[in-house]
Image: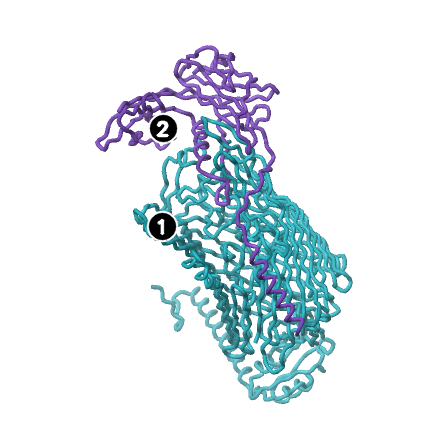
Amino acid sequence: MKINLFGAIRCPKNNDQKALFLMKLSFLFYAICCFQLIAFNTFAQNKVTLDIENGSLESIINQIEAQTTYNFVFNNDVIDVQQNFSLKVVEKDINRTIDLLFKRSSISYKIKKKLVILSQVKKLSNNFTISGVITDADTGETLLGANVILKDKGKGAITNAYGFYSITLPKETYILEISYLGYATKDIEIELKEDIKLTIELEPSLSNLDEIIIASNRSSKSQVTSVLSGRTKLRTSEIKRLPSLLGEPDITRALLTQAGISTTREGSTGFSARGGNIDQNLVLLDEAPLYNSSHLFGFFSIFNADAIKDVTLYKGEIPARFGGRGSSVLDIRQKNGNTKHFKGEGGLGLLFSRLTLEGPIVKDKFSFLLSGRRSYFDLFFPFIEGAEDTKFHFYDLNTKLSWNINENNTLYASGFFGADIIGLEEESNDNESSIGANWSNATTTLRWNHVFTNKLFANFTGVYSKYNFSIDEKDALGEAVEQSAKRSIDNFILKPDFTYYQSPTTKMRFGLNSTLYKFIPADISSTQTDLQIDDEKALELAVYYSIEKEWNKLSVLGGLRYSWFANLGPGDVTLYNPDFPQTTNTAIGTKNYSKNEIIKQYAGFEPRLSLKYNFNDRKAFKLGYNRMFQYIHLISNANSSLPFDLWKPSGTYIDPLEVNQFSAGYAYDSQKGNYNLSIEGYFKTFNNIVEYKNGARTLSLSNTLETELVPAKGFAYGLELTAHKNRGKLTGNANYTYSVAKRKTVSDFSTERINDGAYFPSNFDRPHMFNITTSYKLSKKWEMGAFFTYQTGGPTTQPNGRLTFNDDTFLTYSDRNAYRVSDTHRMDISFTYTPEDNPKTKWQGSWNFGFYNIYGNNNAFSTRSRLDNDVVRISEISFIVAPIPFITYNFKF
Amino acid sequence: MKSLKYTCLIFILLILLTSCSGFNLEEDIPYNFEFQEQVFITGLLTNEFGFVSLDIQKSIPANTIGFNPVNDAKVALYTKGVSNSGTVLVTDSFTVNNGRYTSSQEITPTVGNTYWTEITLEDGTQFKSDEEILKPAIALTITETPNESIRVTIADPIDEENFYLFYVEYFKDDNLISDDRGLIDDINDESELYLNIINHNEGVTVKVSLYNINFNTFQFYNNSLFQGENEVDIFFAPLRNLYGNIINTSTNKIALGNFGIVGFSSVIKDF
């Protein structure tokens, strides 16, 4: 052990050392004298007592000089002694007094002996920051995407996902214009001479004041303001106005009204963004990923509109903070819960109902949200002969707690649970059988917002998300069968995210994403088989940085993301003879990996760039480029996505999907913002898409799934035209999309190549899509909504000939997706009747009724072809072939 | 208020009317997909001395019944020796009968040699099968097992990756009463390959035929077995066409059919 002794100085023995010793001793005395001098200065009679409110600097200086032995030195040209200061000190030391006096000013000081020398700090420090949160005055709900604009200067900020804004400006007096769609615009005069924290409350506009709601272009559907192209924001108020199946506001169906968004088939789950597969959409609910966003096989989305605050879809340029999916991000945020009053809302429908309760636990501090839905189809089954024992219902529950700890810290805990349950039972004299299935999503999100400084905002998120599917079967006939299979995917996510607001024109965002995946492809329990499928585990890490900068007319959002992914053991990887295609017949062995051993890893840079050039404040041209890596894949059959489809991580035989997108667009707003027009074009390339081989056993369970798959690459391009009308009795939007999406398989073996390696239309190829959504205010009480859609029929593969071989008939099949099912089109209408509010009660009710598919068009969900008694039979399967009426009573209290 | 009552009444009536309209989930639709005529070539060349034959037909529309033989094609059979000493025409003399082309002379194939066929249609379209090596016949032995089944043991060569097509035919009084077929792969280099046959009765003759085939021929028969099991539906990927080892050399694309070069062996057992 080394011990340093500082308390004693030993005397040296020789002359040289003596000289050195004397020098050291002299230095010690000198140092002691200096310390003594400092102490004398510090502890002399220099205490100050002052209580001045807005007094001039000159008077304060005079009083300090009078009370102490200190004098002030400054240049009158630099220091304005007439500026006012406030100071309250009692018997405070001079240093502390002066420190307090100039703490929030642009004056710096130095104390030398008995002199206080004042000087002006650099001009940069003359900037001050105004920051805070914008909330709804009635509910306390934070408003994300609200505009804070410097009036007459055009600069400003937009609140982030937590309602936070920060603007750093030179010292001056400003008028801030705060606006948000559906709220009265507010002007606030700010004298910016110090950093300010300001929470701003906006009053919701009354519906009969609709004409003045949209006071600014910035609040409309303008695409001119955002530097990103291909970004769509939907508010639940808009979604609720759309006609919907059985009267249930549906976020996924609302997305399908947007340009470039299509579904594989009427009634199928999920959506395709710009030619991408369903699994290429990252669906986030309060930052938790969801792996199946539908109830009832796709007829209803799992999102309860009453619990949702904001929906943003990124289908073009995607900010660097998002990753892990190839084509789009659907970012859905739940309400925080009313911090001011207890409130409720809900709806009573023909086949399901919903109820939302929210309110403060501690006013303005701590709030809750509880929102649930349940279908009750099953209540009618006992009255239907033969279906008495059938179970079929779905439900979901959204919950959230928000705790505003102080102005710098907020905690959010939110959760979602949704499930579909199906059960069929059959009982006869000699047999009793049942089959049941259920699938569920469960998420928990914990977030901590922390304002480090008024320019640095941070959010720390922890997420647990689980998707689960299970099926069980019992059959008492003959040899009793009892079997069940469970499939699930678990995510554990940690995401620190930082935003630095350098100036009104420069903003930086950086952070880390880490996701641990656990996949259970099939947990089988059976009296018939002992098949076991290996679980899989994977880790995905990503760091990102982005900067958004505005000049006079040019805006840039550049970002870079670096992601790393590893498929981890334990696991067995099947090895194949490289001279043959991968089939179960060509397997030659397995390689074993131990726990947490890296089976295969991938990494790559994902650059993002968005450019916007404003010709003026109503016209803008945009350019963008995105690269996205996707490390997990939905192994879906060729035609549709279903709840039991399998998610599979990239690994030895499945490379990550890489999507590159180039986009360009032009946005135009009319003079008063009544109309917004945009035209956007895109070109996308896809590498390593997973396709099922022809003849693949899509429902089989095995540890060699790769033998059913073949990698593919592809491209998609399209043009989207969108027009919005924002004001007047008639509002709405119309859009047309021309798009092409093609694929080709890549394999060294001709037997694996689909269409002999030529390009074929992807399942999501829709050359023409046209949507029109309108809302017409008939009177103060009545409003009518209508939606019409037309889409080119989806591609399909069909038999195109027959031949005889060994005396049996065989069919020849067309190239993959060589034909199309019939074009689909549909019109929905709805009427909303809102009686006048009763001033004696808080209860507000409205009736919503109408027809889904009003002219009963038969839109095919899928086609089926088979050889039946030597005759080829083709049939179309449709779920909705008649107008579906709906009526819902919506209420608020 | 009156107008609201009327609206509600009309709405309820509409609900009742539309509810009675019914829902038909699946409906047959007329077959109106465009027919694409394709040529289908099948045949086998075994190691046995004899005539070589192959069948050529064109597909017919899927919703019709019949057979469309091609009787005007030119067929040639080629070989190359083990030393790859150059292409030799084995024969281009075939007689045709209802799409079946049979060599005019009997042929003595040589194990180890490479064989393929080239076909030219009347319109000039040319097809060629893969050049495949003729594998040797594999010895089969039959043994009876205690549980009243028979075991056909395949003398599978060690350290070779082989694929087999087998037929099991059941005869009674020289009449074929049933048959089974299947595929075996030996890529895992199993120590012993055998077939267990349990479906036999007294007075029945069982004939087991084994074809030592190449991988593409294996895939062709695999495709044909698969196609019989499935239908084109939402739950399935599109089915495989009967592709094997035929290439349309005019377009350089894979074509329907297969001309297998196989080692053939068989055993017969009377019960």
Please determine if labels 2 and 1 lie on a single subunit. Answer: no
Q: Nearer the viewer, residue A691 or A294?
A: A294
Tell me, for residue B178, which label it has, or none: 2
In the rendering, at what x and y percent does residue A642 appear? 49, 50
Chain depicted in cyan: A
**Chain where mark 2 sits:** B
Q: Which of A399 and B56 is in front in this view?
A: B56
Amino acid carrying label 1: it is Ile
Tell me, for residue A524, which label it has, or none: 1
Q: Which colour scheme is used?
A: by chain
In this rendering, is residue B59 above or below A10? Answer: above
Which quadrant holds the C terminus of chain B?
top left
Query: Residue at (39%, 16%) from the top-left corner?
Result: B48
In the rendering, at what x and y percent does residue A598 appear? 41, 47
Which SS class for mark 1?
A: strand
Query: Residue at (58%, 35%) from the top-left corner?
Result: A758
In this rendering, is residue A792 above or below A370? Answer: above
Residue A340: in sight, yes or no? yes
Q: Residue furthest top?
A: B105
Circle 2 residues within 10 Å: few <14, some 14–19, many ≥20: few
Amino acid carrying label 2: it is Ser
Which SS class for mark 2?
A: strand
Q: In this view, does A688 lie to the left or right of B176?
A: right
Chain depicted in purple: B
